Image (spheres, rainbow, N blue to C red):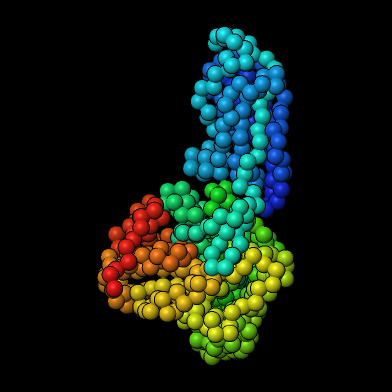
Amino acid sequence: PRPGAAGGRRGLPGEKGAVAIGVELFGAPRVNLCVGGRSSGFTVVKNINFHAVNEPIVLSVKYDGVDALDFSAVQNGRHFSRVYHVNIARNLLVNKKRRFGFGHIGFTGATGASSATQVLSNISFQARRTGMGMWRTLKVVTNHLVNGHGKNVLLRGVNVPSLEWSTRGEHILRSIREAVCVWHANVVRLPMAQDYWFGKGPGQNHGGAAYRRKVRQAVATVRMLNAYIVLDLHHSDAGVWGKFVGQKKMPDQNSVTFWKSIGRIYGNNPCVLFDLYNEPHNVSWAVWRNGGMVSSAAGGKKAYFQSPGMQGLLNAVRSVGARNIAIVGGLDWAYDLRGVLHGYALRERGGNGIMYAAHIYPWKKHWMENVGVLAKKYPIYISEVGCSAPGHQIIGNPNACNPYRWGPRVLAFIQQHHFNWTAWSFNPKCPPNIVRNWKYQPTAHWGAFVRAALAGTRFIPPAK
């Protein structure tokens, strides 16, 4: 049978969703059903008469915020097919079809002996929303993350870059699907640029609507896959819209505008975390936390801009009611976290907590002293980690290590201390790359180790 087009509205992620369902059987018209909002009981749809017994049943679904359904057939109030659990999102994205085949369902349990020519009547189809819902929302409890059921959650995944340098992105949705469904990541980090979000980039029209749509699709894809996404402010502009876009020492006042906008849209979305600023560097701990004047080489000349500090960005997010976990990178290009223990921890008011972040690359030394020092008090997120192939450099830094030894060693360190992490990068053009092409084949020097770690391999720390 051909699955019919299912109707129903589409809502933004986080809205009370509805799912439009069409049921098809051989020799019978499609039956339409709508499960809406937070419905927890079975919803019965209209009856149908059909001649087919033990024929395939096809369920066609238009996704709108519902993660999964339980589905069964009933005759005169009695269930006579088993209840089928449908992961709507994973089937939609992996199979790329809006339908689910349940194989052969025997209806003899309701009617006694039956044959392929028997007419069954008064058959109803029922569906119950069983999505992940708000229990996926993460909160910080001491030094780890827990979900709404109080269970510990450890985030492990990859960075999917390109929206920080491209207004259109490069294979964003496809990369997310591959990372979650094939590589077994449960989180992806999405670097972004604040200027592109508001349509201030080169060639952008309509105020950045297409860019925001791409981000919205990324968030919806992750949510459908029952995973998490970190929205990362990667590039800022030293306080001048549309110019000097790139990595700066600190965020600027336009970054406040960016996070208020993000917070209004994705605030309290259960699958979204906020990484406030990619790599703070070359300022004092006081400016890092509280803000102040920061120098910038803008247009080849030294200029200054006012930074709100990391506390200012957190306040901006909370001011619009967004309680999402906030991720805060330390100094030294998001590596040194020691100042947090010496009076510069951020003040959290009314949110789900703060997770501190670090980036580990081969030239970064003394991991425990700079990063692990916080492990007993706060959750740690290694938001970037990676090494290039022998003889290659990363942004001008020599890869002074044997990656075939460094990769297992750093993953062992992360696993040993139960840190959350996202490896860099799931883009073959952005080293240190995990994949070597758009077929997502892993690089031997780094990607192979990342894929093994995501699949559950435990790496052994080297002997001291």
Residue 123 location (% of width, % of height): 67, 20
Query: In the rendered view, does 10 fall on the left or right side of 54?
Result: right
Residue beneath the point at 64% across and 31% down: 22
- In the rendered view, tell whether residue 241 sits above or below residue 110: below
Which quarter of the image is occupied by the C terminus? bottom left
Which quarter of the image is occupied by the N terminus? top right
Q: How many numbered marks, from 0 up?
A: 0
Answer whether residue 414 is visible to the viewer in this image. yes
Q: Nearer the viewer, residue 381 or 332?
A: 381
Residue 210 location (% of width, % of height): 61, 58
Query: In the rendered view, does 84 fall on the left or right side of 318?
Result: left
Residue 170 location (% of width, % of height): 48, 59
Answer whether residue 9 is visible to the viewer in this image. no
Residue beneath the point at 64% across and 81% down: 308
**Residue sticking out furthest to the bottom:** 302
Query: In the rendered view, does 93 fall on the left or right side of 123?
Result: left
Q: Quadrant of residue 258?
A: bottom right
Q: Nearer the viewer, residue 313 or 133?
A: 133
Residue 300 location (% of width, % of height): 50, 87
Q: Quadrant of residue 139?
A: bottom right
Residue beneath the point at 50% across and 72% down: 376
Q: Quadrant of residue 150?
A: bottom right
Residue beneath the point at 50% across and 75% down: 374
- In the rendered view, tell whether residue 320 sits above or below residue 213: below
